[in-house]
Image (cartoon, rainbow, N blue to C red):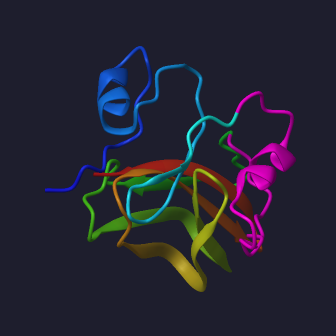
Amino acid sequence: MSSHCKPKFAEGDGGVVDANFSVNAYPTFCLINPNNEIINIDIWPLTGVETFEAAFPAGFEPEPLECSVLAIGEETTIEAAIFPNPVTSHGTLNVQLAQTQTGKFTVYTAGGRILLSASFDGDSLEIPARFASGTYFLSVESDKGSVRKSFVVR
């Protein structure tokens, strides 16, 4: 049985974090390695990304992750319906566009990482929802306009 616990907050099951990692001050940011061992128990106060960089072990040079710009709000210049929403993991997310068009769709994580991107030509899309449970964003850009919608995978 793993001692790994999901992220929690003091307001909701902070005791799980306290018991597994001896963290007792909130907000607390810490570094936990893949073996579930704390390598820095309290990264505070935060002044920027350099605070986290300074907490890395000597010699650790993480590769920077390029993030794209992500608009969180839903934007619509073309009509589109997505269903089912929520979609089951390993199910299919259907997108019905109001008219035939040529363009590109992109699925993003909440953090802006691109998970899937492809071109399309038509008035409907079938996107395999092979993602972990969570909230995602779909951007459709075409010769007729664009639409951004959020969807949930369960």
Q: Residue 119: x, y in percent?
A: 62, 85
Q: Residue 100: x, y in percent?
A: 59, 75
Please give left or right for residue 7 compared with residue 60 in the image.
left
**Residue occupying the point 41% across, 14% down:** 11
Q: Is residue 74 above or below residue 61?
A: above
- Of residues 153 and 62, the one nearer the viewer is 62
Q: Is residue 138 above or below residue 49?
A: below
Q: Residue furthest top?
A: 11
Where is residue 7, by image quadrant?
Answer: top left
Please give left or right for residue 138 compared with residue 86 in the image.
right
Number of numbered markers: 0
Q: Is residue 136 above or below residue 46?
A: below
Q: Is residue 20 above or below residue 3?
A: above
Tell me which segment is drawn in magenta: 44-72
**Residue occupying the point 27% across, 63% down:** 89
Where is residue 92, by image quadrant?
Answer: bottom left
- Of residues 111 and 93, the one nearer the viewer is 111
Q: Residue 30: x, y in percent?
A: 57, 42
Q: Residue furthest left?
A: 1
Q: Residue 152: x, y in percent?
A: 39, 49
Q: Is residue 16 magenta?
A: no
Q: Residue furthest front?
A: 58
Q: Is residue 51 magenta?
A: yes
Which quadrant, please, contains the N terminus?
bottom left
Q: Magenta: predominant secondary structure element?
A: loop
Please give left or right for residue 22 compared with residue 63 in the image.
left
**Residue occupying the point 21% across, 56% down:** 2
Please give left or right for residue 73 compared with residue 91 in the image.
right
- Of residues 68 and 76, the one nearer the viewer is 68
